[in-house]
Amino acid sequence: MSVRGFVRRRPLSSLLLVLLVALGGWTWHERMALQAFPGIISAYTAKEYCSCRYVMNNPADYCLGYVKQALPISTFHDDSQQRRVTARGLGRSSSAVWIGPREGCRLEP
């Protein structure tokens, strides 16, 4: 059976195959960004909450609503004594700490 015959006899299967190849190509092209994505969720939450809470001096409830995302955080800890925030989501953990009034918050390595 030729390619032309396959396409004529199975148009939906052919379309699905073309879409699958296109998705694979796009995934390969964006592989670096897709690998970084899980770390972005926890880093964003930790850094933005720290800034909201300790730089802008907003209440904790407000800051939790401010950093809420469509993808949930599995663990969140706010250590108000040390002004350190730790967030874990999509298997990655990130912490941010308040440095001072001029420097604000910084993500920890």
Image (tube, rainbow, N blue to C red):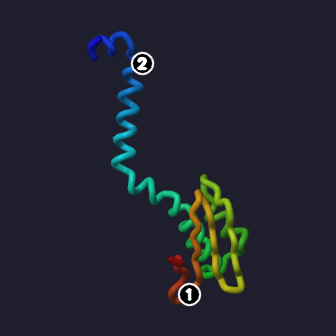
Q: Position of residue 65 (x, y in %)?
A: 67, 63
Question: In the image, is residue 11 above or below residue 69?
Answer: above
Find residue 45 and report its image quarter: bottom right
The quadrant in which the N terminus is found is top left
Say if mark 1 contacts mark 2, CB within 8 Å.
no
Question: In the image, is residue 52 above or below residue 82?
Answer: above
- 87 with respect to 28 (left or right): right
**Cα separation between marks 1 and 2:** 58 Å
Front residue of this view, candidates 18 and 104: 18
Which disc number belongs to residue 99? Answer: 1
Q: Position of residue 4 (x, y in %)?
A: 27, 14
Helix, strand, or loop for circle 1?
strand
Helix, strand, or loop for circle 2?
helix
Report the residue at 60% width, 57% height from top: 69
Please report whichever mark, 1 or 2, sits nearer to the chain's N-terminal start. Answer: 2
Report the residue at 59% width, 67% height from top: 93
In this figure, what is the number of numbered marks? 2
Q: Residues within 10 Å of mark 2 (few under 14, many from 20)?
A: few
Q: Amino acid at mark 1?
A: Ile
Residue marked by disc 2: 12
Report the residue at 62% width, 64% height from top: 88
| Image depth: mark 1 or mark 2 in front | 2
Question: In the image, is residue 69 above or below residue 4?
Answer: below
Find residue 6 and report its image quarter: top left
Q: Position of residue 53 (x, y in %)?
A: 65, 77
Q: Residues within 10 Å of mark 1 (few under 14, many from 20)?
A: some
Which disc number belongs to residue 27? Answer: none
Report the residue at 71% width, 86% height from top: 81
Outermost front residue:
1
Q: Amino acid at mark 2?
A: Leu
